[in-house]
Image (spheres, coloured by chain):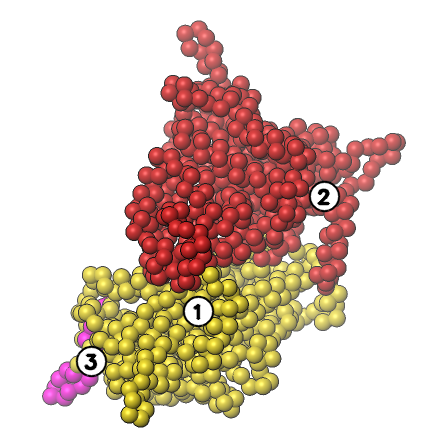
Chain colours: A red, B yellow
Amino acid sequence: MRQPLARELHDLLERGRDRQLRLAVTGLSRSGKTAFLTSLVNQMRHAGLEARLDLLPAAREGRLLGARRVNQQDLGVPRFPYDQAMAALEETPPRWPEPTRGISELRLAIRYRPPRRGLLGSDTRQLTLDLFDYPGEWLLDLPLLAHDYPGWCQAQQALTGTERRSLFADWHAAVAALDPTAEADEAQLAAIAERYAEGLRAAREAGFADLQPGRFLLPGELAGAPVLQFFPLPGLARLDPAERERLPPESNYATLARRFQYYQQHIVRPFYREHFRRFDRQIVLVDLLGALNAGPERFQDLSRALATLMQSFDYGQRSLLSRLFAPRIDRLAIAATKADHVTPEQHGRLVGLLEALLAEPLKDLRFASVPVRALSLASIRASEAREVEHRGQRSPALRGTSLDGEPLLLFPGEVPDRLPDADFWARQGFHFPAFRPLPLEGGALPHIRLDAALDWLIGDKLT
Amino acid sequence: MRQPLARELHDLLERGRDRQLRLAVTGLSRSGKTAFLTSLVNQMRHAGLEARLDLLPAAREGRLLGARRVNQQDLGVPRFPYDQAMAALEETPPRWPEPTRGISELRLAIRYRPPRRGLLGSDTRQLTLDLFDYPGEWLLDLPLLAHDYPGWCQAQQALTGTERRSLFADWHAAVAALDPTAEADEAQLAAIAERYAEGLRAAREAGFADLQPGRFLLPGELAGAPVLQFFPLPGLARLDPAERERLPPESNYATLARRFQYYQQHIVRPFYREHFRRFDRQIVLVDLLGALNAGPERFQDLSRALATLMQSFDYGQRSLLSRLFAPRIDRLAIAATKADHVTPEQHGRLVGLLEALLAEPLKDLRFASVPVRALSLASIRASEAREVEHRGQRSPALRGTSLDGEPLLLFPGEVPDRLPDADFWARQGFHFPAFRPLPLEGGALPHIRLDAALDWLIGDKLT
């Protein structure tokens, strides 16, 4: 059997010859990660036959020959559940696949022919594409590495929208009674931490995205462990810093600070160290339409969450990320998903809005010479574009089926092409519906501009 | 704040002065780990007031002053859910607590007075008791470290009871079609592995215990990862060993062998290295009555599982365990639990049967000078001993309430005091019922000989 060292060397050579690529897909929950990966694998599996990939030159030119799944490299990472996702889409009526939790992985071997150069035909070649899927919430924890515990408490204090604050009311009441200098009672801290986690869960349910610490929302095997039982201490500012640091290790302050440090060291860092810094390319999915539906406070919150999330791609020499982990992502895509939920003439505005929302982070990225592209797409198209006539005027509309099975024909509204102002929120009638997936008709899954995203993310490796 | 190194030093000193003890509780699923730990903590919390601990000298002599929960050391290990367990027992009607999954931990600070020596009264002292709870299934994986993949396949082949084999029928059919020399198909291996895991789950449901690999039954965050997608290859014996080792790394054989090795290195070893070798004392709980209820094949299977499990406590110089991990457990208890499910005069026979079942492992342990004691107990007594008169003869009986709320008064049968033979199984009418917990009456939980177990496990540290 080939030994690990030999295998690593082999992998290194493959990568050196541009034959191996690690592509990561992320986004906050419900941004459409599972649909994106399912559709990507599905298109590649149909490559050479019935794939719908006209915007990917290798496919358009007939050079994409096919793809198959092969053994993944990291045996301890769950495999992306492609078969289960396809089974859900193939049911009658079709269902959206279950969302993934945590990180998952899938390796594809893609066979292609390079473009013909000169008179002779060319050989077939193979690109090994490692696909990774992980929760965007994990990236929201990066700034947590920049803080010590008192600094983090202060940063969290700044998040004070009315609606958001009301979701944490129980926690606010409980933590107000906690004396940072008193001796810690494990059960009491656990109870207050549970209120904090409940607040985070309620906020996520309500559509908020800027939620730290991310692992509180997906505790997995750490459920009930002290490392997930800390929270910001609002009363900390009233304590003299010197006095604070003299508090005994049994105090509430010192106990919570210890847990915060453990979280930094044992939860946040390992993800960046073991996974993130090995990705070559990255796509970030954003459910912009969902945030538009949810109103100004949550749209604002998404904006802040995205700004935080984008710090993980800021490779400027002096960025926190570069100093800590020396990552290698050399190409980035930001995609507004679910474009099939608005009529086609709105797609341009959707990209415009995404670019407006990310204006500052995009500037930073371009300054740091990270190639980045913003686009809109629908990984699995669930509606059909139509025109309806109303009082003699033709106007665009969408046809689809609601999740309950009701046929829908509607115009969901106009997407603002720049950041919405108070006026927009006041008069806004924007409300896009949720569609059930279309019944499968054989061939590859229907999509909108998934091929454009693929061209940007892997197209240059297929030449 | 005290630094990690200083804290470790402090802990080391505490332990050197016999003031710190790490006590681990294990047993196969449904052996009663949660009830044992809940009752232990409950008795300690009531120490000095209403604890029922007459067989523990420190308690009998009034030297046990009290106990409280303090911050545990390992922030990444879930805390044992004592409050939730007590809440279940306090419901109307009372419920058995939810079983724990994976490892959990709880730290108690116990205050006591050493026995009076000379004329002067003595100070109070403190014992820091770290309690750990982990699935006995993890110990069944130790022998897996002694094998390479072909050896493990052969060892698993040996497990061929009719009933057990029938539970793996689907897997047998699927694996028979797999050619070890063919190129591996991830989806096919995943499907066959899922059948294997289904077989293990069905076997556990049916009361079997000798199940490897243990982590297949509690996958946690590894669900769907290739490391949990291997299984024994029955056809391996037909391959020439030299030829086998020449198979390419893409072959089914090499793929499965690689996963097996990954499982050894990344699942089995870390448990022993990070947890097991740090335990000072251990109690192993055994649901012997459940196995008697279930019949000869499963009783035989429990016997084999216990023999395997006991290897983790064999500290002979040449044992696998000592060579690999240098563990330090210096005292061991093996307890037949749920003694309240048979009438009191059967308790002696229950211990006799346990010793007969473990005769060989106990010999090995005693040869290796590991102090070990076998006993029977009920962590939380759920029945009351009564006598009934039938045709002028008084005979023992149990009174309790079934899980459905029916009042019960019965004689569950005689426990054989040596290994049951064919004759016993032929005429056996043994059938013990499941009792609902008794309603709490204030004070500590009722139990049977939990105090004897505590005396053996921690009594010497309270002097």
- Badge 3 vs badge 2, beta-carbon distance below 8 Å: no
Left or right position of A327 against B220: right
Q: Residue at coordinates 64% horizontally, 71% vertically from top-left?
A: B148
Taking the view exactly as shown, the residue that stands out farthest to the right is A119
Q: In this view of the protein, which residue sits in the foreground, A209 or B172?
A: A209
Point out the frontmost of discs 3 and 1: 1
Please identify the dominant SS of the magenta region: strand
Image: magenta residue range = B387-404
Q: Badge 1: few (under 14), some or many (20 or more) residues near its Cα, within 10 Å?
A: many
Q: Quadrant of residue B350?
A: bottom left
Q: Amino acid at mark 1?
A: Tyr
| Parent chain of label 3 | B
Q: Quadrant of residue B191?
A: bottom right
Residue A380, x across and y down, in percent: 53, 33
Taking the view exactly as shown, the residue that stands out farthest to the top is A392
| Quarter of the C terminus of chain B within the rendering | bottom left
The residue at which mark 1 appears reads as B134
Residue A118, x across and y down, in percent: 87, 31
Q: Establish whether labels 2 and 1 are both on one chain.
A: no
The residue at which mark 2 appears reads as A127
Q: Secondary structure at mark 1?
A: strand
Measured in 3D between alpha carbons, the distance from the residue under mark 3 to the one under mark 2, in whole angstroms, is 73 Å
The residue at which mark 3 appears reads as B385
Q: Amino acid at mark 3?
A: Ala
